[in-house]
Amino acid sequence: MLTLTFLVKTLFDFYIMVLLLRIWMQWTRCDFYNPFSQFIVKITQPVIKPLRRVIPSMGPIDTASLLLAFILATLKFPLEMLIQLGGVSPDPLYLLVGLLTLVKSAGQLIFWVIIIRSLMSWVSQGRSPMDQVLYQLSEPLMAPVRRIIPAMGGIDFSAMVVILILYVFNYLGMDLFPTLWYRL
């Protein structure tokens, strides 16, 4: 049962993160002709395209992708409980669990985008098509920090500060929802 639970959790988490990445890319107006952006669009388009006919975007927010990510996040926990315990009962608390799952997934996505951008800055130095997308995604978060704490000695501390803020929010989630936060 643990293997099946791991597979289900991983697939749900991956697709939720891809949907959140698509929302984030649209919000920051990333270059959608970039090969990495095209991959994200192609992997989500078969599900999002029919939803867009019913649920239009609200400004820069892709509401169809957000709704689908929330539905998947809400279904993830009961499905895990069904696999582990063999049964599950409907509970309105699953909506809160879905919202918390979405918030935690967004924090993890921001964390990994900043880490990958930092590592790629050492290796590819702006030559990779993914560099531009990662820059466009992370710069709205890192630029305000850079205005407060400028680069010192050629070292940019904005990525570390944003990651530290993410850790604070993660620990806040652990404090507010102690048993639930670990299971998400």
Image: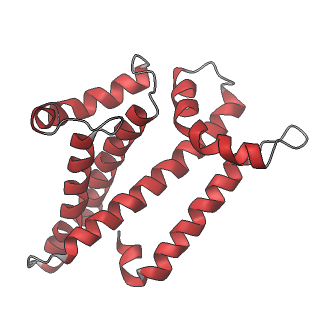
Q: Residue furthest right?
A: 153
Task: Look at the image and tell me whether residue 2 can be seen.
Answer: no
Q: Is 21 left, or right, of 75 in this rendering?
A: right
Q: Is 19 left, or right, of 106 in this rendering?
A: left
Give the residue displayed 59% in from the left and 45% down from the top: 141
Quadrant location, the C terminus = bottom left
Residue 13 position, x and y percent, is 32, 54
Give the residue displayed 56% in from the left and 24% down from the top: 132
Residue 10 position, x and y percent, is 31, 55
Give the residue displayed 35% in from the left and 36% down from the top: 22
Q: Is 130 left, or right, of 139 in this rendering?
A: left
Question: In which quadrant of the rendered view does residue 74 lie?
Answer: bottom left
Between 55 and 12, the one nearer to me in the picture? 55
Quadrant location, the N terminus = bottom left
- Total marks shown come to 0
Residue 139 position, x and y percent, is 60, 37
Q: Does 95 appear above or below 30?
A: below
Task: Look at the image and tell me whether residue 173 can be seen.
Answer: yes
Q: Does 2 appear above or below 67?
A: below
Q: Does 95 appear above or below 128?
A: below
Q: Is 37 left, or right, of 47 in this rendering?
A: right
